[in-house]
Image (spheres, rainbow, N blue to C red):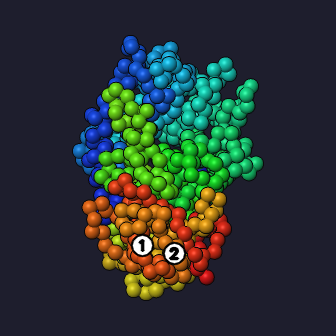
């Protein structure tokens, strides 16, 4: 088997301060601990699957419990909240009791199990995403087992995998691809690979390889699935493939897992081709992915940027980071997290959006996609259970292990403590207001002196970065790389970083021709009507050569992470705030603004944001 170039470090102890800590607390108290009891049908739909009258369900109803569990476990990794852990344990105990003896853990009646159809979809019958629901249940159960050692959870995931194999493996007359909704239902390839790596059960790998073959399946009316492997190896852009919906990212992640298992480069090559295609052509200025729930080949497209799509994008990007150890990938995850993930959440943590547009307003998913609400689950929809995972996935990439040392990707007020294979513990404490400012003081405290390579992410947007080690300037610091400090570390060692927070600009095209996005570090600066006296149609034109903004404090009831005041050429004052905070009170916001004296910069592998500075 191949090993990732960098990977998450289990049992890392995190203490976050600042805005991330506030979000984690809000989501935990206002949603994760409230959702199951406030929406009891999250589990009751499994208990009622064969009772008359059948419940009226959406095709993806089986996903809610698994998505919720995945979000909760990944948040728990960051907080180690004792009451949340107890809450999750009770939830899992209830969930596994609802699994049938054959391993089925879905909401559909006996005759409809894993067939792709059910009589109670939307009250009139239709297609189901049944294997998709089992995929999310498996993922959540395996994450919980990894975190807690709960053998019942792992056993439940194994039963699901066994059922999938018993039903479909080697069955040419009843293939998984023939159940329809293939970009969803083929996602089980991902968890089958994860489970194979844990148990070495050969049939799980055999089933995964069979699903890869089904990627290229053809039906009488054309492709049945996304042909992710073959299309990508020919260099096709993701939006040009047969199934460029966001759900496809989950079966695509199965190819990354197959690379680790088999060592076959074609899986890695195909995955990387898809990832870069999305960055170039479909990742928006706010770090969100999808337009109208699929890739369009146009980052300026004004279709809805769905919460679930961005969450899937970050999950795929974590896989890309493990594959490549490329600091630019970590920069991309930060972009999505600090802008889209915070932007799709209420600052209280009580609700998330369905759509977090580049320009517009923020609406709770319970409003925008209320059609998913049902008796017993008034707040449940695909996004409400999935959104918190965007915060929880910080645990996947904040601090990683690499050969010979540690990789620090997360910047922000925090303390992270890890235990190395040598038995030494290392504590990394950051004193900083980042991303409000670019100054970061990092204290490195090993339990005893230790030789260690510490890799510090130098973002691609930081054109001029200053680094000092114990007061002495470090030379040859370059953007879009990791700065490797390989030395014997001792208690009291200190690293000072000064990242370049001068404005940089993405000049728009197509729907946003004549406008630009303004960034301050990783933060997309955004007009919010609440902060300004002028209405959106009165926003002044800004001059990039004179953007000498003033950082101001947040004195309002609705918090902002970054707020700047600029003076326009006509003398008017304009306040811009971070995209994640914009529109919190329901006011309209704009992240594409009129800016003069800035030239277009083209996409590049070391500048995927295609942002530049004047001159």
Looking at the rendering, which quadrant does residue 90 occupy?
Answer: top left
Nearest the camera: 157 or 331?
Answer: 331
Q: Residue at 52%, 73% (x, y): give it.
A: 541
- Numbered label attached to residue 541: none
As drawn, the residue found furthest toward the top would be 52
* Image quarter hosting the C terminus: bottom right
Identify the mark nearer the N-term, 1 or 2: 2
Residue 143 position (above or below residue 179):
below
Q: Residue at 54%, 60% (x, y): give it.
A: 285
Nearest the camera: 73 or 387?
Answer: 387
Q: Can you identify the residue that label 1 sits on? A: 574
x then y, percent, for residue 502: 49, 78
Nearest the camera: 285 or 244?
Answer: 285
SS category of the residue bearing label 2: strand
Total labels drawn: 2
Q: Residue at 68%, 39% (x, y): give it.
A: 242
x then y, percent, for residue 215: 67, 36
x then y, percent, for residue 270: 67, 49
As drawn, the residue found furthest toward the left would be 83
As measured in the structure, the alpha-carbon distance from the residue carrying label 1 to the one carrying label 2 is 9 Å
Query: In this view of the protein, can residue 583 be seen by the observer?
Result: yes
Nearest the camera: 373 or 452?
Answer: 373
- Numbered label attached to residue 542: 2
Residue 345 position (above or below residue 133):
below
Q: Residue at 28%, 35% (x, y): give it.
A: 38
The answer to whether the residues at label 1 and label 2 have Cβ atoms under 8 Å apart is yes
SS category of the residue bearing label 1: strand
Looking at the rendering, which quadrant does residue 173 occupy?
Answer: top right
Within 10 Å of disc 2 (Cα), the crowding (few <14, some 14-19, many 20+) is many
Within 10 Å of disc 1 (Cα), the crowding (few <14, some 14-19, many 20+) is many
């Amino acid at each position: 088997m191949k090993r990732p170039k960098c990977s998450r470090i289990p049992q890392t102890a995190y203490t976050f301060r600042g805005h991330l800590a506030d979000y984690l607390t809000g989501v935990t108290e206002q949603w994760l601990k409230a959702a199951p009891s406030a929406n009891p049908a999250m589990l009751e739909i499994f208990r009622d699957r064969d009772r008359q009258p059948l419940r009226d369900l959406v095709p993806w109803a089986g996903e809610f419990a698994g998505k919720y569990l995945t979000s909760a476990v990944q948040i728990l990794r960051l907080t180690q909240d004792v009451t949340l852990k107890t809450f999750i344990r009770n939830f899992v105990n209830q969930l596994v009791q609802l699994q049938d003896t054959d391993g089925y853990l879905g909401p559909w009646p006996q005759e409809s199990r894993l067939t792709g159809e059910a009589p109670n979809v939307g009250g009139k019958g239709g297609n189901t995403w049944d294997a998709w629901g089992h995929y999310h249940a498996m993922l959540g159960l395996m994450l919980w087992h990894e975190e807690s050692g709960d053998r019942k959870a792992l056993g439940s995931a194994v039963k699901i995998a066994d059922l999938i194999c018993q039903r479909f493996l080697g069955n040419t007359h009843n293939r998984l691809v023939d159940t329809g909704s293939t970009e969803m239902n083929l996602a089980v390839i991902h968890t089958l690979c994860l489970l194979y790596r844990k148990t070495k059960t050969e049939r799980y790998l055999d089933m995964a390889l069979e699903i890869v073959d089904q990627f290229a399946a053809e039906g009488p009316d054309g492709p049945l699935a996304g042909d992710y492997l073959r299309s990508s190896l020919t260099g096709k852009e993701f939006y040009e493939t047969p199934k460029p919906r966001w759900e496809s990212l989950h079966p695509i992640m199965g190819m990354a897992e197959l690379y680790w298992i088999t060592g076959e480069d074609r899986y890695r090559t195909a995955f990387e081709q898809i990832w870069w295609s999305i960055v170039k052509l479909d990742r928006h200025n706010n770090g969100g992915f999808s337009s109208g729930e699929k890739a369009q080949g146009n980052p300026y497209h004004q279709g809805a940027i769905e919460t679930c799509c961005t969450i899937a994008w970050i999950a795929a990007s974590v896989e890309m980071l493990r594959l490549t150890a490329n600091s630019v990938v970590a920069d991309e995850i930060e972009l999505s997290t600090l802008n889209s993930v915070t932007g799709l959440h209420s600052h209280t943590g009580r609700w998330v959006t369905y759509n977090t547009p580049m320009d517009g307003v923020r609406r709770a998913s319970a409003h925008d996609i209320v059609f998913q609400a049902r008796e017993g689950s008034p707040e449940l929809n695909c996004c409400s259970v999935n959104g918190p995972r965007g915060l929880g996935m910080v645990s996947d990439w904040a601090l990683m292990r690499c050969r010979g040392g540690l990789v620090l990707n997360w910047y922000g007020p925090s303390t992270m403590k890890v235990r190395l294979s040598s038995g030494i513990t290392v504590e990394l404490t950051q004193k900083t207001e980042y991303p409000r400012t670019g100054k970061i003081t990092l204290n490195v405290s090993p339990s005893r002196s230790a030789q260690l390579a510490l890799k510090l992410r130098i973002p691609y947007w930081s054109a001029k970065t200053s680094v000092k080690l114990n007061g002495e300037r470090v030379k040859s610091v370059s953007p879009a790389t990791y700065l490797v400090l390989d030395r014997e570390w001792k208690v009291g060692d200190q690293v000072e970083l000064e990242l370049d927070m001068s404005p940089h600009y993405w000049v728009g095209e197509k729907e946003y021709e004549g406008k630009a996005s303004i960034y301050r570090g990783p933060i997309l600066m955004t007009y919010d009507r609440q902060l300004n006296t002028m209405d959106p149609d009165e926003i002044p034109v800004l001059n990039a050569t004179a953007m000498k903004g003033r950082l101001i404090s947040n004195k309002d009831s609705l918090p902002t992470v970054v707020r700047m005041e600029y003076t326009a050429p006509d003398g008017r004052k304009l306040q811009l705030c971070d995209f994640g905070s914009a529109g919190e009170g329901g006011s309209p916001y704009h992240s594409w603004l009129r800016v003069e004296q800035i030239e277009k910069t083209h996409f590049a592998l070391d500048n995927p944001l295609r942002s530049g500075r004047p001159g």
